[in-house]
Image: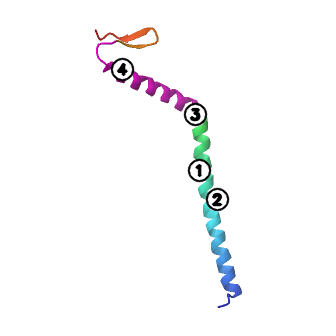
Amino acid sequence: MARTIDDIRREIEREREELVSAVGDLRRAVGVASRLRRKLPALAAGGAATGFALRAVARRGRGSTKTRTGRFRLVNRG
């Protein structure tokens, strides 16, 4: 079955609407990425602090050893 000119125009218009929607989604995604990039130092510091705290908590349960970082003792468990 042959397509008419009107069928082709409707298909082009539908594709155009899909492209407009996709571009809008992409702009929103890029906006989120740029906001996260600006906050990256704060996010990295928060992640490092969380990792340090979790490590300290995990080390507390290892028997009678003292929890320490390097040569500094944080909790005396003995």
Q: Give the residues drawn in magenta, as a range.
A: 41-65
**26 relative to 58 in the view: left or right:** right
Residue at 64% from the left image edge and 59% from the top image edge: 23
Which amino acid is tagged 2? Val
Quarter holding residue 73: top left
Say which mark, if any, is on residue 23. 2
Compare marks 1 and 3 and give the one earlier in the sequence: 1
In the structure shown, which secondary structural element does the residue marked by tag 4 occupy?
A: helix
Main secondary structure along the magenta-highlighted residues: helix
Q: Position of residue 72 (x, y in %)?
A: 43, 9
- Of the two numbered discs 1 and 4 in the rendering, the one whose residue sits closer to the viewer: 4
Compare marks 2 and 3 and give the one earlier in the sequence: 2
In the structure shown, which secondary structural element does the residue marked by tag 1 occupy?
A: helix
- Of the two numbered discs 2 and 4 in the rendering, the one whose residue sits closer to the viewer: 4
Q: What's the distance in space between the residues labelled 2 and 3, CA to CA?
A: 25 Å
Residue density around tag 1, few if under 14, some if 14–19, many if 20 or more, within 10 Å? few
Residue density around tag 3, few if under 14, some if 14–19, many if 20 or more, within 10 Å? few
Q: Which residue is tagged 1?
A: 29
Q: Which residue is tagged 4?
A: 59
Instruction: Please identify the quadrant where the N terminus is shown.
Output: bottom right
Furthest-bottom residue in this view: 1
Q: Nearer the viewer, residue 32 or 53?
A: 53
Which amino acid is tagged 3? Leu
Vertical relation: 50 (above or below) 22: above
Task: Determine contact: label 1, label 4, CB under 8 Å.
Answer: no
Vertical relation: 18 (above or below) 38: below
Q: Which residue is tagged 3?
A: 40
In the structure shown, which secondary structural element does the residue marked by tag 3 occupy?
A: helix
Compare marks 1 and 4 and give the one earlier in the sequence: 1
Which amino acid is tagged 4? Arg
Compare marks 2 and 4 and give the one earlier in the sequence: 2
